């Protein structure tokens, strides 16, 4: 099934993955959000093929997560800058990072993040916006059950 | 670049995407975590090709996010059950859902989630585990700067 078919699912996760579910897209966006903004630097940092980086940057620009800005006139040079929409994905990325820290690196994170506003090293916690308690799978109920599950009953 | 090359990056986001960065993997896991556990039901719900669903389930089983359990003897029938490792991805998925609610559905979520422990409809918020304040890109500093950025200085 082609990726564009994801857009027919009435689901914010599917719609999000349609934008950033491709292998490298989130990693490229992560670099840009944390200051690695130039094509050659992103390529060197991630070690991916140029044509793939071009495609992933196009996706990010197309969906408005990143804009291309000129930083030099002669010769013309551009860098990529995250928009509000792109920066707003950082918290979800941090939640994915926290999972990887726990399950892929056994609780020994290869990279540390300092939370400037409190001064401590931080790990992302995902909480309920209303009560502030951690969101756990067991406590969540979907309002509209999936059609397939409904048909099973 | 082949997906397995992601594993050489010393980065929890890369390692996480190596497991769940494929188009359908997170959607399949989401269904299983929320109770759609049988092959035919997942397939009907997501509308994806059988061979792709087989491959995505294999990935989830291989990485220990899901186990295959027999629920009927004659004929033998199996369902897929999320492990602790798999269920622990739900908070990060909810953070991705929240982004999609805001940016792909203009703040009108197509699916609502009830937080059973507080009784309210909930949206995921990503906060600093230490101080509890929302984690925003602008407040985060990476301890080990990317090699490419370091070389630039």
Image (tube, coloured by chain):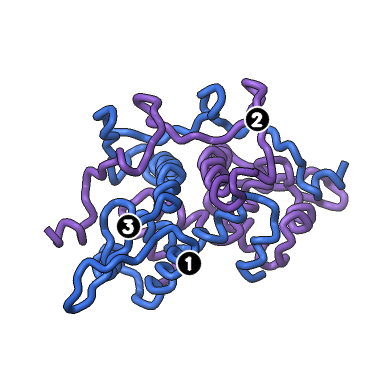
Chain colours: A blue, B purple
Question: Left or right of B149: which side holds A53?
Answer: right
What's the distance in space between the residues labelled 3 and 1, CA to CA? 15 Å
What's the distance in space between the residues labelled 2 and 3, CA to CA? 33 Å
Is disc 1 placed on a helix, strand or loop?
A: helix
* Label disc, if present, on residue A45 of the rendered structure: none
Q: Are marks 2 and 3 in contact (CB under 8 Å)?
A: no
Instruction: Looking at the image, tell me whether mark 3 or mark 1 is earlier in sequence order.
Output: 3
Residue B92's place in the image compared with A130, above or below, is below
The part of the image, by quadrant, that contains residue B2 is: bottom left
* Label disc, if present, on residue A32 of the rendered structure: 3
Residue B95 picture location, percent across and down: 52, 41
Foreground residue among A11 and A44: A11
Image quadrant holding the C terminus of chain B, namely: bottom left
Question: Left or right of A27: which side holds B52?
Answer: right
* Label disc, if present, on residue A62 of the rendered structure: 1
Residue A104 picture location, percent across and down: 41, 46
> Mark 2 — residue?
B121
What's the distance in space between the residues labelled 2 and 1, CA to CA? 32 Å
Residue at horizontal 55 percent and vertical 46 percent from the top: B102
Residue farthest front in this picture: A73
Number of residue marks: 3
Is disc 2 placed on a helix, strand or loop?
A: strand
Residue B61 in view (yes/no): no
Foreground residue among A141 and A104: A141
């Amino acid at each position: 099934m082609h990726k564009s078919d994801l857009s027919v699912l009435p689901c914010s996760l599917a719609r999000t993955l349609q934008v950033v579910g491709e292998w490298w897209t989130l990693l490229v966006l992560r670099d840009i959000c944390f200051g690695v903004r130039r094509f050659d630097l992103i390529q060197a940092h991630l070690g991916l093929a140029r044509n793939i980086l071009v495609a992933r940057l196009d996706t990010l620009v197309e969906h408005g997560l990143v804009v291309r800005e000129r930083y030099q006139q002669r010769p013309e040079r551009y860098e990529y800058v995250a928009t509000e929409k792109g920066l707003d994905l950082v918290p979800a990325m941090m939640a994915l990072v926290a999972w990887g820290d726990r399950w892929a690196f056994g609780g020994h994170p290869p990279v540390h993040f300092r939370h400037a506003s409190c001064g401590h090293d931080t790990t992302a916690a995902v909480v309920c916006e209303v009560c502030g308690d951690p969101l756990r799978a067991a406590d969540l109920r979907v309002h509209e059950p999936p059609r397939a599950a409904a048909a099973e009953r």
